[in-house]
Amino acid sequence: MKSPLRIGIAGLGTVGAGVIRIIQNNDDLIARRAGRPVVITAVSARSRRKDRGVDLSAYDWEDDPVALARREDVDVLVELIGGEDGPAKAAVAAALEAGKDVVTANKAMLAIHGNELAALAETAGRALRFEAAVAGGIPVIKTLSEALAGNRIERVMGVMNGTCNYILTRMESEGRSYDEVFAEAKALGYLEADPRLDVGGIDAGHKLALLAAIAFGTRVDFPSVVLEGIERVSITDIELARDLGYRIKLLGVARMTGRGLEQRMQPCLVPADSPIGRVEGATNIVMIEGDAVGPIVLEGAGAGEGPTASAVVGDIIDIARGLRLPVFGQPAHTLEAAPPARVATPAPYYLRLLLEDRPGALAKVAQALGEAGVSINRMRQYRHDTPAAPVLIVTHRAAEEAIHQAVAAIREVDVNLDEPVALRIEEI
Amino acid sequence: MKSPLRIGIAGLGTVGAGVIRIIQNNDDLIARRAGRPVVITAVSARSRRKDRGVDLSAYDWEDDPVALARREDVDVLVELIGGEDGPAKAAVAAALEAGKDVVTANKAMLAIHGNELAALAETAGRALRFEAAVAGGIPVIKTLSEALAGNRIERVMGVMNGTCNYILTRMESEGRSYDEVFAEAKALGYLEADPRLDVGGIDAGHKLALLAAIAFGTRVDFPSVVLEGIERVSITDIELARDLGYRIKLLGVARMTGRGLEQRMQPCLVPADSPIGRVEGATNIVMIEGDAVGPIVLEGAGAGEGPTASAVVGDIIDIARGLRLPVFGQPAHTLEAAPPARVATPAPYYLRLLLEDRPGALAKVAQALGEAGVSINRMRQYRHDTPAAPVLIVTHRAAEEAIHQAVAAIREVDVNLDEPVALRIEEI
């Protein structure tokens, strides 16, 4: 058996403790599978005294993660500090410059500095791996960059923020408002310190930008991700969408189009009986469509100690086995700087209107839609005891611009009583 | 860029043509991702003249796949001939002995000769990869042997024969008998030349044996797979199971138990609203449970030109990138010869009985169950206009032996009018 692979772990939060637990508990099978033992030599975190439920006594301690990264007896830095800059990035850069491989779960850092760090890793001839950064224990990065490497990828999409999906499915199952369920999730500690990272779609947007880079061979371009959070999703729309056979998800969609790279993270309707539509609670799901493989679906826990640590250890074992791929599946300098698509691929839309209940009201709306070039697939007017009639419309596939134009026109129609709601329906 | 990886393809059926199509169409992105071009130098098949819809003019032709395997200008043999022995195995062995890597989609060959071929590959220091052999384009082998390598695997299960699932879901959706749907599937060319490979569960059993070896670090042991086909699944049971919230699937389950390795491929009831329960038509699904990752689910097309060829090309690209793992995820000589579990892990069972409709009939059945130590969870007696009353029972978790004993006792009860049906309910 070959010499042990020596690990230094920077950051001992939930995931760090989980990685230590796996390496301690499963050392025998890891050694058999990796062809060599995987051992932890040193660790680093902010507080040395905190009880993390794992025995750290066998490991050296470093206060400074950069010092950890440079240790002679560390072959692989495992970066679990988090944060897009600061000590996380400093430690990763130091490790690569010192000729060490790196495994990280840090989606924010890679979404912002991924191109730079990938170039650094490749110059150093070392691996920089990040399976744990996207969808926890589900092997999305490996599937996209290795298993499906023969495919021209057509679309990648998924539900990749468990907290948002928890909030949306709980709103639906309990018929409660966003504000109520948000407050509850916050009290339960499900949200990031800055909740906009979750409910604003930023965290999920980071993940989408990483997947898009691998899928389409493009430079990581998080600033171009169209981001829309779930804050404005109402229980009314959740219930009416369900009534039409859809569910509302914070859905990430990336595709390469003739107009450039499209990356969107926004609340969308998806068919309730599709794999994505059925995803409940904190589960993550990713669907990848390739020209040869067709659609494949990966589903599982997207966060939490065990699943995320499982992905980190999987990356470590790959390195122990000698696998060293370009960070985003092809050499960093070959990643294209694709222009962002300015408008979305045409799709059907869900429109919810509140109209004055008098003759000709619908005709005015239908005219506004028609003039914008939007045609109606289905329409329902709901029973009401008030003079205001709720109207739902599912359009045929329409350009995003046309929908904006139609909504602007409906706003001006005299029978319109409330701000129209327009949500994209992603076809699956 | 490094020198091209040179491929020889033996077997030009659907999958072979698909591999050629991918390599021809996606050569640019494959070269970028693999870090070197992947080129086909020679091919081999039974008939040189047959039109396969792909241009073969640039490739040398070999009549003999063994000669192809030994060619100087072939680095990787892609074996797509099929069959557990004969030219497929001869070519694979010849390639490994000549120091070439091998990619194959041949589950039968690996299920029967996997241990021997793995030893041969490892002695030669070459890769023998087979992602395409299990569940088509879904990266089950890669997920199990790489992404989840840090996990102690607790259970692997799945629906891995698309034809069987097609037959079962079509029986359900159309309310037709097994014989009718089987005949239709046969006429449509969906079945293997020997249909027992599909409907007898043999093909799916081959796949399960391969997954079990990787999951549990055991020698491939296909002869110990408990095999039961779908021939005896009746539309009555499909409909009644559905009524109870279950669907019937040809389900493969492998787990390591205190009593040895359990490998079962048999019709089971699974919850209708579980990912496995929802799988329709020819789709394959595999669920893997690891101690760290929890359950993860992979789903997609399990067969067909594109998906299977996608998996073959993924393996080729791994080899082009220099990835060489032990065939079953750890060195062949470390795979344990686990004794097969003689009895199944306890589970709830579905029992369907036909009883004479007279006072005390149910009591007699309940007594037979009680004496066997089987307790009843739910029971339904259905409306009937005849003197024969259909009775459904869902038991609490029970030992397989106890169910056999109960069924034997019920057979002898004077009110029993038909052979009792007992089906395992796999808990998900």
Image (cartoon, coloured by chain):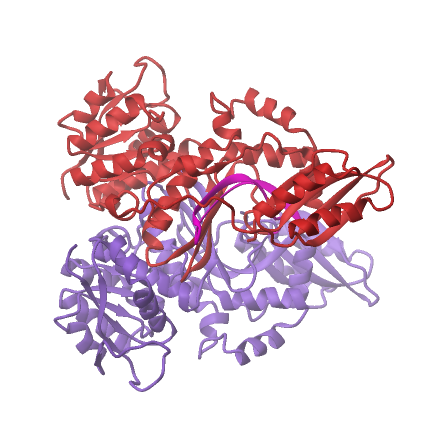
Chain colours: A red, B purple
Q: Quadrant of the N terminus of chain B?
A: bottom left
The answer to whether one can see residue B189 in this image is: yes
| Residue B368 pos. (x, y %) | 66, 55
- Where B175 falls versus A182 (above or below)? below
- Where A48 falls versus A191 (above or below)? above
- Where B330 falls versus B41 (above or below)? above
Q: Name the residue located 77 percent from the left edge and 34 percent from the top edge.
A: A417
User: Residue A254 in magenta?
Assistant: yes
Q: Name the residue located 49 percent from the left edge and 65 percent from the top edge.
A: B162
Q: Name the residue located 26 percent from the left edge and 46 percent from the top edge.
A: A33
Using residue A351 as the reference point, say whether residue A33 is left or right of it.
left
Using residue B221 as the reference point, say whether residue A39 is left or right of it.
left
| Residue B279 pos. (x, y %) | 55, 57
The answer to whether one can see residue A139 in this image is: no
Q: In which quarter of the image is residue A13?
A: top left
Q: Please state which of residues A407 and B197 is positioned toward the viewer in this rendering.
A: A407
Q: Please state which of residues A104 and B262 is positioned toward the viewer in this rendering.
A: A104
The magenta span reads A244-273
- Which SS does the magenta portion mostly show? strand
| Residue A3 pos. (x, y %) | 14, 39
User: Residue A301 in magenta?
Assistant: no
Q: Please state which of residues B27 and B367 is positioned toward the viewer in this rendering.
A: B27
Q: Quadrant of residue A177?
A: top right
| Residue A5 pos. (x, y %) | 19, 36
